[in-house]
Image: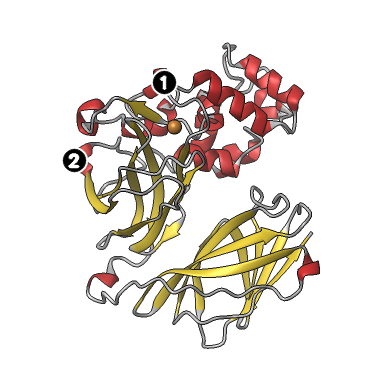
Amino acid sequence: MLRFTDNPAHRPGTSRPPARPRAKAWRASAIFGACLTLLTTVLAVTFGAGNASAHGAVSDPPSRHYGCYQRWPNGPSQQMATEDPMCYQAWQADPSAMYNWNGLFREGVAGNHQGAIPDGQLCSGGLTFNGRYAAMDKPGAWVAPSRPSRFTLNLNDTSSHGADYIRVYATKQGFDPKTQPLKWSDLELVGQTGKIPTGTRTPVEVNAPGRTGHHVLFTVWQASHLDQSYYACSDVNFTDGGTTTTTTTSTTTTTTTTTSNNPSAGCSATFRVTSQWSGGFQVEARVTAGATPITGWTVSWTFTSGERINSSWSATLTTSGSTVTARNAAYNGSVGAGASTTFGFVASGTAGSPTLTCTAS
Ligand SMILES: [Cu+2]
């Protein structure tokens, strides 16, 4: 629900944005209230080119515009200004960048991405759609979820475009996303795929050793239905400093599926080990609502062989001895009937198969 006029940040004399045509969209969205999805669809249809249905974006680790939409679906607030200043400036600059999180693409690039996108404009797709996403090019303290040097990147391919290819680049060690605009020469290829058939999931295995701290991932997703190229800057905080360069244990994906044995709890949860290496592993956890929608969830489990959580995203994790409790983040507590959402973590130790208990509220 958008209550834009209640927001202290938008009262006259504070940081009220200039009156521009999109103010209409804000008012419209306030009227439509909960119909955010509808609004998104309408905007996508209004502004999209080519295939006028919804498109997609890099969702994990989230692209800047998608992350700002996911973390702050209700729009700007004082809390956002304090906790997430780069999303705040993006929402101020152009809210339609967030509502059109699935529309950061160019058409007819014919594979010459470097020719189509000048240095300093990579995150906005070369100021595509009249600079709608220009705020994504701004250097600054973007929220950067933690990842080890090996991890899986995922798309939210809402239109089942598939891909001719996906290429993932990472900034070189020494690049500072807080002060430097992103240039092609700052990047190294760290993951790629060949053709991904329409309608299949599209994960990319990324291996970006030798990096610590805040980095930018730049993804080029060449959709396969027509010459439509999606671009995305995702911020990450590399945690293992590239120690995996010498311990290249094979990253076979083990699927550990443990389901809550209490269907009346209103939700169930599964773990999937997306990568593992000597001394650690990364898990994508999926929470699925039962027959009725839920507004919050808690997943808990007990590690049995001394595993320890190092970092997590899209949930708040607390540990007590070997028991871990994950509570939904503000933006992913509400899950429709039968729908699902994900959170993740990196832990030290060896991946086991804990029994998961999911409780909905
Ligand atoms: Cu499309």
Image quarter of the C terminus: bottom right
Contact, CB < 8 Å: mark 2 with mark 1?
A: no
Whether residue 159 sits left or right of residue 30 in the image: it is left
Whichever of labels 2 and 1 marks the residue nearer the N terminus, that label is 1
Q: Choose top left, top right, bottom left or bottom right for residue 233.
A: top left
Whether residue 247 sits left or right of residue 266 in the image: it is left
Which label was assigned to residue 129? Answer: 1
Residue 146, percent from left and from top: 44, 59
Quarter of the rendered image showing ligand 1: top left
Whether residue 357 sits left or right of residue 103 in the image: it is right
Helix, strand, or loop for circle 1? helix
Instruction: Check disc 2 and give the amino acid type.
Output: Ser
Helix, strand, or loop for circle 2? helix
Foreground residue among 279 and 57? 57
Which label was assigned to residue 185? Answer: 2
Query: Looking at the picture, does residue 59 appear above or below residue 325?
Result: above
Query: Looking at the picture, does residue 146 appear above or below residue 233?
Result: below
Describe the colour scheme in one phrase: secondary structure
Instruction: Check disc 1 and give the amino acid type.
Output: Phe
Whether residue 195 sits left or right of residue 273 in the image: it is left
Query: Looking at the picture, does residue 129 appear above or below residue 58?
Result: above
Q: Choose top left, top right, bottom left or bottom right for residue 138.
A: top left
Foreground residue among 38 and 81? 38
Foreground residue among 125 and 252? 252
Residue 245 in view (yes/no): yes
Q: CA distance from mark 2 to mark 1?
A: 24 Å
Q: Residues within 10 Å of mark 2 (few under 14, many from 20)?
A: few
